[in-house]
Image (cartoon, grey):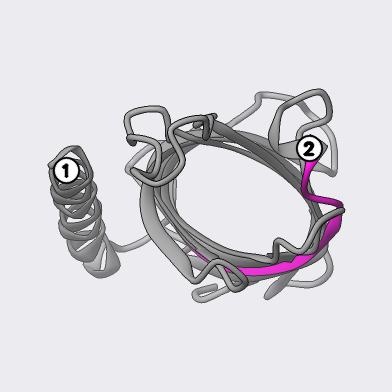
Amino acid sequence: MLRCAFNRIFLFLLVHIVTINIPLYAQVETEAWRFRPQIGVWFGPVTPVPGTKVADVLVTSLGGGLFFRGNLPSNALRTEIGVSYSYYTSRTTARLHSLPVYGALVYTLPINLPLSFFVKAGAGSNYLYNSVEKSKNWLPAGYLGFETSFPAGKLVNIGVRADYYFLYEKYLSPPANNPNYEVHNGHFFNFGLMVNFNLSR
């Protein structure tokens, strides 16, 4: 029930973000700001946060993702939606597929450098599939991110990004056939090289 309610909230937020941004496509350039939607990709290492219970089982792997970003009528705030994929091996037989989906607000730090710096916060849902146990579930997820990039021409930006996902799992009950099974929240960290493309000049 909690999962369904959370997914409905996330869907509402996603629709709200899209409906806010659609009219902005028709805006003309002003002195204060200009809508510059971006689409981007990233690729890099993904890992459970060291010191957490998940890190005792899963090991560092590789992942990648896509994101779309658009402006609000502000110089400092943007919206972002994204999805990524990670495949984790483990010290046991466990094999985990992870597919987080999120929506976030992006704040541009007021630093006067050729580099741009962004901090991000949002929420979403994370699909997990254990290919050995054949178990799968959607979990509520919190999201925090940091990014820095520089322009490589009018259409392309290159940079690095770091993403943290908090997976809320403790609301789940242990399996009925294993009462000693412990449920722990998940903490994951991604660090990647990023390229994004400006969709308007």
Q: Nearer the viewer, residue 113 or 145?
A: 145
Residue at x 79% of width, y 72% of height? 153
Mark 2: secondary structure: helix
Confirm whether the magenta stretch covers residue 179: no
Q: At x 51% / y 76%, what residue is drawn? A: 199
Decide if residue 107 is in sight here: no
- Mark 2, Cα crowd under 10 Å, few <14 / some 14-19 / many 20+, is some
Q: Judge by depth and name the residue closer to the eye, 161 or 178.
A: 178
Marks 2 & 1, CB-CB < 8 Å contact: no
Q: What's the CA distance linking mark 2 and mark 1?
A: 30 Å
Depth check: give the residue in front, 186 or 123.
Answer: 186
Q: Look at the image and give the residue range highlighted in magenta.
A: 57-68
Q: Residues within 10 Å of mark 1 (few under 14, many from 20)?
A: some
- Give the number of the disc on residue 142: none
Does 37 appear above or below 105? below
Under mark 2, the amino acid is: Ala
Residue under the image location 26 percent in, 62 percent down: 27
Mark toward the start of the polypeptide (2 vs 1): 1
Quadrant of the image occupied by residue 18: bottom left
Question: Where's the N terminus, which quadrant?
Answer: top left
Q: Secondary structure of the magenta portion, mostly?
A: strand
| x and y percentages locating residue 170 in the rendered image | 41, 28
Give whichever of 56, 189 is nearer the camera: 56
**Residue pointed to by mark 1:** 9
Q: Position of residue 13 (x, y in %)?
A: 21, 46
Q: Which residue is mark 2?
A: 55
